Amino acid sequence: MGSTASLPLDREPAALAMRIGVVAAEAALATFARNLDLDDLADGDVDFQGSISPAEWPVFSLVIDTLAEAGPADGRSLDERRADALNDLARICMAAKHRRAGAA
């Protein structure tokens, strides 16, 4: 592989990884919107995998479980962490949308 010094800034590996992450986050949020209801989260007993189609599950779980990773002192269940991760996911997507609108 050659030097990346001649690549435009929007083609740098970090910029490309960020764009891939935003696309994955937006896909996961759209999957959530199509398959789950916010009222389901209020009950605290959400069957994430049972609610998401097998075709959409890999990207959804990659994004949500990355955001829901437990810290050393985190005693919450995976479903509780996933529910909280949805807030982070929504903020990421809103920030990306705002950034694109500002760049247009």
Image (spheres, rainbow, N blue to C red):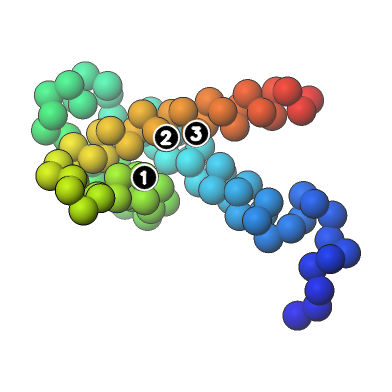
Which element type, helix, strand or loop, lies under badge 1? helix
The numbered disc on residue 67 is 1
Which badge, 1 or 2, is on the more N-terminal residue? 1
Type of residue at label 3?
Answer: Ile
Q: Characterize the local packing of mark 2: few (<14), some (14-19) or many (20 or more) Cα atoms within 10 angstroms.
A: many
Determine whether 24 is above or below 33 in the image. below
The numbered disc on residue 5 is none
In percent of the image, x 13 and y 29: which residue is there?
Answer: 44
Q: Are marks 3 and 2 in contact (CB under 8 Å)?
A: yes
Q: Characterize the local packing of mark 1: few (<14), some (14-19) or many (20 or more) Cα atoms within 10 angstroms.
A: some
In percent of the image, x 68 and y 51: which residue is there?
Answer: 15
Q: What is the CA distance from the residue labelled 1 to the residue labelled 2?
A: 8 Å
Q: Position of residue 96 (x, y in %)?
A: 59, 32
Which badge, 1 or 3, is on the more N-terminal residue? 1
Type of residue at label 2?
Answer: Leu
Which element type, helix, strand or loop, lies under badge 3? helix
Q: Which residue is mark 3?
A: 92
Q: Which residue is mark 2?
A: 89
- Residue placed most toward the observer, 13 or 72: 72
Residue 56 appears in view: no
